[in-house]
Amino acid sequence: GNSVTQMEGPVTLSEEAFLTINCTYTATGYPSLFWYVQYPGEGLQLLLKATKADDKGSNKGFEATYRKETTSFHLEKGSVQVSDSAVYFCAQGRGGNKLTFGTGTQLKVEL
Amino acid sequence: NAGVTQTPKFRILKIGQSMTLQCTQDMNHNYMYWYRQDPGMGLKLIYYSVGAGITDKGEVPNGYNVSRSTTEDFPLRLELAAPSQTSVYFCASSDDRDDYGYTFGSGTRLTVV
């Protein structure tokens, strides 16, 4: 069946460090891929998305590239800020079908 | 442009009490979902609906019921609340576009004591 695997957290970084959060998926066909962010006490918000192979989603300095060969969609940011501290969820799905979510990765950014 | 609205934001229930968590969306989405999120955990799907009058069980439906009489509303009913239902509940909606994903509500934090 469909699944999403994310790296375990928490990930703790110093401000201005480089961020990578790994995400791999298994699916039949070619799903759309998403990253959601959840700030403390809030719901999930869509951060970025990609709908086909080699697409790059980007938003607020975050990027992720849809890699069909490695079935991956790793989240990256060149220089994190304290305000990026949140839980990040990778997800896959398409066309109104139920999204499959990863378990989430907590990011803590310290001064 | 309200999106997905959940009420209440917080609630404390006693064991055995019942309540309804409300969810309304104003985007004319056919698909709606209820998730629960336990501390430090990911999302678990409780129930979902692909349109008015149609509902189906998700991963953890026991102890819950839903109805979908209109496109806009998807209430979640808890019968005979138990401490294991202490959680944060999120409602979400989507349409059938491949690139849409979900729009989430802000959540209801429920404590059963």
Image: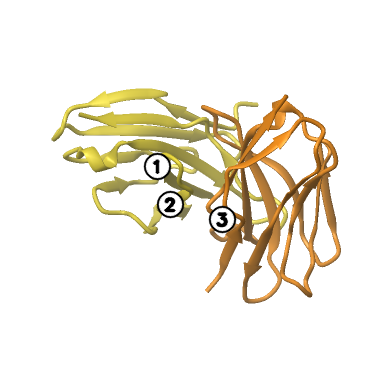
Chain colours: A orange, B yellow
Residue at the spot 66% in from the left edge and 64% down from the top edge? A24
Quadrant placement of the N terminus of chain B = top right
The answer for how far apart the CA atoms under marks 3 and 1 are is: 14 Å
A94 with respect to A78 (left or right): left
Check chain identity for marks 2 and 3: say if they share one: no
Residue at the spot 85% in from the left edge and 59% down from the top edge? A55
Amino acid at the residue labelled 2? Lys
Q: Which residue is mark 1?
A: B38
In front: label 2 or label 1 = 1
Q: Which residue is mark 2?
A: B44
Check chain identity for marks 2 and 1: say if they share one: yes
Q: Is residue B104 above or below residue A7?
A: above
Secondary-structure class at tag 3: loop
The answer for how far apart the CA atoms under marks 2 and 1 are is: 9 Å
Give residue A56's position: percent from left, percent from top: 85, 55
Q: Which residue is mark 3?
A: A102
- Marks 1 and 2: in contact by CB < 8 Å? yes
Secondary-structure class at tag 2: strand
First along the sequence among labels 2 and 1: 1
Give residue B38's position: percent from left, percent from top: 40, 42
Quarter of the figure with residue B112? top left
Quarter of the figure with residue A22? bottom right
Mark 1 belongs to which subunit? B
